[in-house]
């Protein structure tokens, strides 16, 4: 199970990479393996203000559709357009080319509530 130490995680299986005042968000290796083959990523929140734990989109796999929950409050700035033609990137490269959104960080204090790789590993029993 790939869990990069430099990322933060949520109990809902999203990861967060902070670059300045922008958060890059995707789903974890664990989440994509549980979902199976991802066939569609639907994000309808670009340019919208969202709060932590709001649904910002969905990931559709062969057998199920799963909501994506925002790890932070802020504005969704960008959707990874590569996922329109290649949603399987979420499976093959969840922490790289399979990122899902970039968002502004409204409240940096919320970063303290995110999980470390060790805490996330414990959550999923790894």
Image (cartoon, helix red, strand yellow):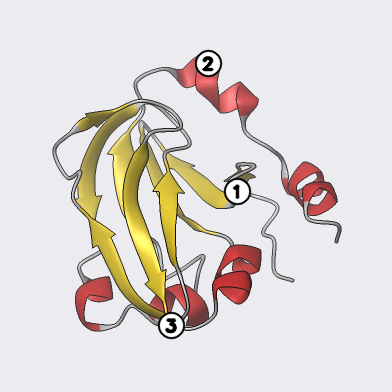
Q: Secondary structure at mark 2?
A: helix
Q: Position of residue 118 (x, y in %)?
A: 81, 47
Q: Which residue is mark 3?
A: 62
For mark 1, what is the residue? 7
Q: Position of residue 105 (x, y in %)?
A: 36, 28
Q: Quadrant of residue 45?
A: top left
Badge 1 crowding class, 10 Å Cα cut-off, few under 14, some 14 to 19, many 20 or more, is some
Real-space Cα separation, disc 1 to disc 3, in angstroms? 28 Å
Estimate the spatial distance between the alpha carbons at disc 1 and disc 2, rounded to whole Å. Answer: 16 Å
Residue to which mark 2 is pinned = 109
**Residue furthest front as drawn:** 63
Q: Position of residue 53 (x, y in %)?
A: 45, 32
Who comes first in sequence, dot 3 or dot 2? 3
Query: Mark 3: which secondary structure?
Result: loop
Image: 12 above or below 40: above
Is disc 1 placed on a helix, strand or loop?
A: loop
Q: Quadrant of the C terminus?
A: bottom right
State the residue at coordinates (37%, 70%).
Answer: 60
């Amino acid at each position: 199970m790939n869990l990069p130490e430099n990322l933060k995680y949520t109990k809902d299986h999203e990861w967060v990479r902070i670059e300045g005042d922008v958060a890059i968000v995707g789903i974890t290796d664990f989440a994509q393996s549980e979902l199976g083959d991802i066939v569609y990523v639907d994000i309808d929140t670009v340019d919208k203000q969202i709060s932590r734990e709001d649904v910002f989109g969905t990931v559709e796999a062969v057998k199920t559709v799963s909501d994506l929950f925002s790890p932070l409050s802020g504005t969704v700035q960008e959707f990874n357009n590569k996922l329109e033609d290649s949603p399987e990137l979420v499976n093959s490269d969840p922490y790289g080319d399979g990122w899902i959104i970039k968002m502004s960080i409204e409240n940096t204090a919320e970063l303290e509530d995110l999980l470390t790789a060790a805490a996330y590993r414990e959550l999923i029993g790894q």
